[in-house]
Image: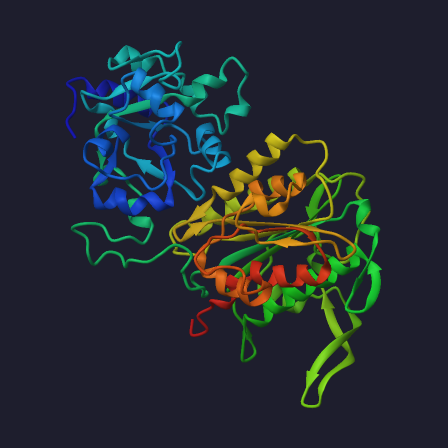
Amino acid sequence: MNKRSNWEEFKAILNQHHITKLYHFTDRDNLESIIKHGGLLSWGDCQDQGISIAKPGGGGPGSLSWGLDQRAGLSHYVRVSFTTQHPMMYVAMNEGRISNPVILEIDPSVIYDPETRYANMNATRGEANVGNTLNDFKSIHFNSVKARKHFDLDANEQPYFQAEILVKGKIPLSAITNIGNFGIPIPNQPQALQSKNAYTARIDREHPTAFIFLVDQSVSMKRLTTFNGEDMTMSEAVARIVNGQINELIQRCVKSDETRHYFDIAVIGYGEEAYSAWQGDLAGRDFVTPQEIRDNPYRKITVREEVRTRKGISVKEVEKNQWIGARHDGSWTHMHLAFRKAQQLLEVWMADHADKDCYPPTIINITDGQYNHVSHDEMAQVSNELKSLFTNDGNVLLFNVHIVEGNSEAVAFPATVGELNGNGYGEKLFNMSSLLPLNYNEQIRQLFGDDKQADIRYRAMGVNTGMEHLVKMMKIGTLSSTWVNNNQ
């Protein structure tokens, strides 16, 4: 890209504020087209060249966003920001325009191009200062754009969080510094990467994945249910199911007498607070390795279980390891605190594995009721923040499972919100949950019936789910654990 004559003055300002990257959010489904066409094109240039945008974050033809761009003369500019937490990314997720967001990192040298413009807030706002001079660049509130989120700013300063760099026409691939991290071949670099779809990374010791179980432990979980023919509290049934799933994960890590580090596993309980739910020697820990889990069950229990033998199915007493216990003492259901704790854990985990092609972490949230003391908008926001975290292989997968004590009409893995038959809480969970990749469909069809189609993507959620359905949903939620490369 060309440089304006005074580009070094712009660079000095960037250095003063320690700004080394700019950012542009898009959907993972758009990456192949971006690479094919040599970079990020403005939507106006895409239209001029007959390029179809798979998932336009701005809404596409006829949308309000594109209309505002046209009115402001911005349809031929690519808009980039100073933040990875752009509010409009979450708006686009809420409105279903994008489902698997990725953040493209942009070399700040695009700022120096003579045709680049600068806006101190969203450029389509009437009060925005938009221009292409050094003074226009200086009008950006650099302290505000460096805030982690716009919620961290005073209300009158929040608009300045969305300051923009407007790049004319196209940002070339050479200026998208992380474009090689998504497993799609780059022109002129045919040997650098292998083409692959998202959510296909094999799991091994060099490329682990992570599982986080979120368990509602509020007082309502003391209600009675039946599991494996025994009457017990819902909290006890859920604890047994989660413990059973943890045991399955650990067994997949055992080769000979070696326990391999294929997964990191955390269990978060929540009621009035959110906390580590491990017990015994693991109490207070967050992510724990398979070896540590295998070595440290906090107790063993004997349960009655159906066992398949050569003579058929018989009921036997079986000893089971337990790592978490039944708990139902939370006065409230502060689900948002559990989501925030999971987010904190995953941000560290992602940073530790940023240079690896790891299968994205999975979060499974199990709850028996509505969340408290948080607005629906805030719950949607924190859900979107979790779902927007990504590895090179795909976005974090968030499952939400609403459980009941009896045998209500369960809806598991719906494709559309209409399948929830007007269940208001189910609709909220639907919007909070991930859209699953197609490679989950075969297992969903095996466990939930052939009426589930093979070529439709399903939502990672269930409502009015009994304990037997929960067991099946947990198997789907931990499906990635079966894609282990046992040779590594």
Q: Position of residue 18 (x, y in %)?
A: 36, 27
Front in this rendered view, residue 117 or 260: 117
Q: Quadrant of the C terminus?
A: bottom left
Count of marks, rendered view? 0
Residue at x 53%, y 46% (from the top left corner): 416
In the image, residue 426 lies at what x, y percent?
64, 43
Determine the image quadrant of residue 116. Answer: top left
Q: Position of residue 287 (x, y in %)?
A: 59, 54
Q: Is residue 208 above or below residue 23?
A: below
Residue at the image point whose x is 67% and y is 90% from the top: 310
32 with respect to 140 (left or right): left
The colour scheme is rainbow
| Rendered location of residue 204, percent (x, y) | 45, 66
In front of the other: 50 or 279 = 50
* Residue at figure coordinates x 54%, y 24% from the top left: 152
Q: In the picture provided, is 113 more to the left or to the right than 344? A: left
User: Farthest residue in the bottom direction?
Assistant: 311
- Residue at 66% over, 68% down: 295
- Quadrant containing the N terminus is top left
- Regarding residue 472, the answer to whether it shows in the image is yes
Asked whether residue 324 appears in the rendered view, the answer is no
Taking depth in this image into account, of 161 and 309 the one nearest to the observer is 309
Nearer the observer, 384 or 401: 401
